[in-house]
């Protein structure tokens, strides 16, 4: 079955700097890769997703890249702000949505 | 904006007891899911449901678990005989179509299950 690895587990960046979170997946049949943001005690919320027929997608300060050959995808957040502090999860889907272990993003003022 | 709702927000039960967790998906959605998240860990897929039957289930979803859509609005997860390791946050989600069809899954606020 699918296995998703996510790194780093914790990422601390200065406010205004960029943050990059990386994930790898094992099942080449996976075709949909969402990223979720989860604030403490709250539900996961989709922030961006990418389909397997696209290499990159951008939405304001957030971008995702996908390398199907290498089976990895990354989340890029530019100009980080305090409200970006949360746990971020990547996931890969091939009929089941399999999640990474999460990255705790800390934005230092 | 419509949201997925879940009740109760917190359920405490004794080991061996049955629990039913309830969810009301977004009204025009057709696919429903249950996930669990043990405290501080990743979200784990349990089951997906479409057209009144299970479409996918994980290894976690064993004979102790069942799902049902008893009416046109509710979607329930039943755990027949709870174990200590069932303690977790359970999230319900729904989507307009399956994630195989690339659609966003909307999550409910979760039910925190504590098994004593």
Image (spheres, rainbow, N blue to C red):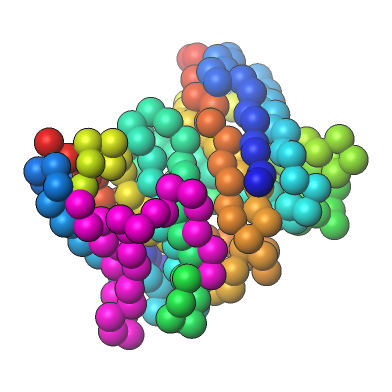
Above or below, A76 relative to B78: above
Q: Residue at x 12, y 51 (%)?
A: B17
Q: Quadrant of the C terminus of chain B?
A: top left
Q: Name the side, left or right, on which A8 lies relative to A56.
A: left
Task: Residue B64: say if magenta.
Answer: yes
Above or below, B46 relative to A80: below
Above or below, B93 relative to A105: below
Residue B29 seen by the camera: no
Q: Name the side, left or right, on which A99 lies relative to B23.
A: right
Residue B17 seen by the camera: yes
Tally the numbered discs: 0
* Foreground of the two, B48 or A14: B48
* Foreground of the two, A74 or B69: B69
Q: Residue at x 14, y 47 (%)?
A: B16
Q: Residue furthest bottom?
A: B72
Above or below, A21 relative to B86: above
Q: Name the side, left or right, on which B33 lies relative to B19.
A: right
Q: Name the side, left or right, on which A29 lies relative to A85.
A: right
Task: Residue B33: say if magenta.
Answer: no
Q: Residue furthest front?
A: B63
Q: Quadrant of the N terminus of chain B?
A: bottom left
Relative image position of residue B36 (x, y in whole percent)? 38, 46
Residue segment shown in magenta = B55-81
Q: Residue at x 28, y 36 (%)?
A: B85
Relative image position of residue B111 (x, y in whole percent)? 25, 50
Relative image position of residue A17 (x, y in whole percent)? 65, 19
Q: Residue at x 57, y 61 (%)?
A: B104
Relative image position of residue A67 (x, y in whole percent)? 85, 40
Quarter of the rendering containing residue A90 = top right
């Amino acid at each position: 079955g699918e296995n998703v690895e996510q790194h780093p587990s914790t990422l601390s960046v200065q406010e205004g700097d960029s943050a990059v979170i990386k994930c790898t997946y094992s099942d080449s049949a996976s075709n949909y890769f969402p990223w979720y943001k989860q604030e403490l005690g709250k539900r996961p919320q989709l922030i961006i997703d990418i389909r397997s027929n696209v290499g990159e997608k951008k939405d304001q300060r957030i971008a995702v890249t996908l390398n199907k050959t290498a089976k990895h995808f990354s989340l890029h957040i530019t100009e980080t702000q305090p409200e970006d502090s949360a746990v971020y999860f990547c996931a890969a889907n091939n009929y089941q949505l399999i999640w990474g272990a999460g990255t705790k993003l800390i934005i230092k003022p | 904006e419509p949201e997925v709702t879940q009740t109760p927000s917190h359920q405490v039960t004794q080991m061996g007891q049955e629990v039913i967790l309830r969810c009301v998906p977004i009204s025009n959605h057709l696919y429903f899911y249950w996930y669990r998240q043990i405290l501080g860990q990743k979200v784990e897929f349990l089951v997906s449901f479409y057209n009144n039957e299970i479409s996918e289930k994980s290894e976690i979803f064993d004979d102790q678990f069942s799902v049902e859509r008893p009416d046109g609005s509710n979607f329930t997860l039943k755990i027949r005989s709870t174990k200590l390791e069932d303690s977790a946050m359970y999230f319900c989600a729904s989507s307009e179509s399956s994630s195989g069809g690339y659609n966003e899954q909307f999550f409910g606020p979760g039910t925190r299950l504590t098994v004593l």
